[in-house]
């Protein structure tokens, strides 16, 4: 039997349980008002917290940036040491990084985890001799360490999952041993100032722009595949990648007086050349809508630049008429300028498809 509250605060039987009354609407209005008040209070607290966090970040940003620069210089790999590896070669690097990028995306890890993984891999290869058959194992151990260091626990890959991705090429004990060996080799110094952390600092002074951020990370990940950028510090790589991203997206560049505007011009030029042949794994990754489809945007921009350069280079040929007197004087002028020695044309050469057929080397008594 339903009950109602009496004037004395006690509940007494009530026959109108299924009958609406004016009090029901009043109770609903009061509950809605309480929810609205609670939501406004939470929003005010969130806004206040963001303002305090922003003030604190601005106060300590210089100290944080100085510490990050110090950390990146202390945890950089040695390219010359990797050059003298006996088995692993630089041409193997793109294949391993393609695997790591796919594993990183499959486990939905943070962007900083990929950059930290590559840093741990390069630092280990700078100090230890790595066999070709263990190269992928070192990469998996670096990914496991980086994920444990900065990612959420539920996203950290298990050894069984890593072994499955390696097609059971290694035993589970080998992953544990390699993880311990990497940490011992690096003296347990895992922390490293990654590119994405510098990107966050560079974008903190401007309006949030996810497209610029995604394209900056895309360009920085393209640089991971090339030897020339292994020795480039993450701070320089972040600023240079952001400068290219802003140029492609027609965004205003940062002021030269700001930290984000102090990019290296030579690094910008070298990075722009690498964009013409990116890894197809990265192209698929950054073609998704979640990452603003920046890979397609970069490809369209490069095609436009290529068409523009071809249009400017398409100049009508100029016909030059040489008189007999100029023809006689030309050899005398040429003797005063160093000339590249040229081989005389073989008498039996035949023009096939517009190309000169190389002369046949005589043999026997004719040699």
Image (spheres, grey):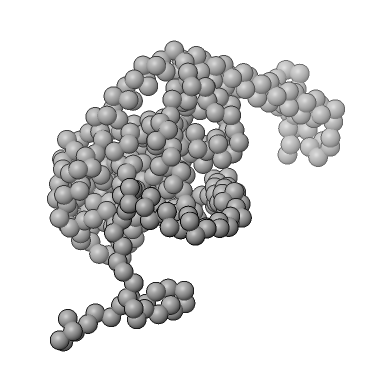
* Position above or below: 31 against 20: above
Q: From where the camera sits, is residue 318 visible? A: yes
Q: Is residue 28 left or right of residue 55?
A: right
Q: Position of residue 125 (x, y in %)?
A: 20, 46
Going 32% across and 36% down the picture, which residue do you hit?
232
Q: Is residue 183 left or right of residue 269?
A: left
> Which image quadrant for residue 236?
top left
Going 36% across and 78% down the picture, which residue do you hit?
349
Along the line of sight, which residue is nearer the eye, 173 or 303? 303
Along the line of sight, which residue is nearer the eye, 162 or 4? 162
Q: Position of residue 197 (x, y in %)?
A: 41, 31
The C terminus lies in quadrant: bottom left
Residue at the farthest front position: 325
Going 73% across and 39% down the picture, which residue do you hit?
1
Q: Is residue 57 left or right of residue 317?
A: left
Q: Position of residue 296 (x, y in %)?
A: 57, 51
* Position above or below: 261 against 303: above
Going 31% across and 56% down the picture, which residue do you hit?
340
Q: From where the camera sits, is residue 10 visible? A: no
Callout count: 0
Along the line of sight, which residue is nearer the eye, 14 or 147? 147
Q: Position of residue 339 (x, y in %)?
A: 32, 53
* Position above or below: 204 against 352: above
């Amino acid at each position: 039997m339903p009950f109602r509250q009496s004037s004395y605060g006690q509940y007494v039987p009530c026959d109108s349980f299924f009958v609406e009354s004016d009090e029901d609407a009043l109770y609903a209005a009061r509950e809605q008002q309480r929810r609205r008040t609670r939501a406004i209070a939470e929003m005010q607290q969130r806004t206040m917290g963001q303002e305090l966090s922003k003030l604190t970040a601005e106060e300590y940003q210089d100290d944080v940036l100085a510490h990050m620069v110090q950390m990146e210089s202390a945890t950089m790999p040695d390219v010359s040491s990797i050059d003298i590896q006996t088995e692993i070669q630089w041409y193997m690097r793109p294949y391993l990084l393609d695997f790591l990028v796919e594993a990183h995306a499959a486990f939905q890890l943070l962007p900083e985890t990929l950059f930290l993984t590559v840093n741990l891999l390069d630092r280990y290869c700078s100090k230890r001799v790595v066999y070709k058959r263990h190269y992928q194992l070192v990469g998996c151990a670096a990914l496991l360490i980086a994920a444990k260091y900065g990612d959420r626990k539920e996203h950290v890959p298990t050894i069984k999952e890593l072994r499955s991705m390696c097609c059971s090429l290694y035993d589970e004990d080998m992953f544990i041993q390699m993880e311990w060996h990497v940490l011992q080799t690096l003296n347990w110094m895992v922390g490293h100032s990654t590119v994405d952390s510098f990107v966050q600092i560079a974008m903190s002074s401007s309006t949030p722009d996810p497209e610029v951020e995604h394209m900056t990370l895309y360009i920085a990940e393209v640089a991971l595949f090339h030897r020339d950028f292994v020795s480039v510090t993450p701070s320089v790589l972040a600023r240079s990648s952001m400068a290219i991203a802003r140029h492609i997206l027609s965004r205003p560049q940062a002021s030269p007086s700001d930290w984000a505007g102090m990019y290296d011009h030579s690094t910008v030029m070298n990075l722009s050349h690498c964009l013409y042949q990116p890894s197809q794994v990265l192209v698929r990754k950054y073609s998704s809508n979640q990452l603003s489809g920046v890979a397609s945007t970069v490809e369209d921009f490069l095609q436009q630049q290529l068409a523009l350069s071809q249009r400017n280079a398409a100049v009508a040929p100029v016909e030059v008429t040489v008189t007999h007197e100029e023809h006689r004087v030309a050899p005398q002028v040429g003797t005063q300028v160093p000339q590249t020695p040229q081989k005389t044309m073989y008498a039996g050469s035949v023009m096939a498809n517009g190309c000169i057929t190389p002369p046949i080397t005589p043999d026997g008594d004719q040699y």
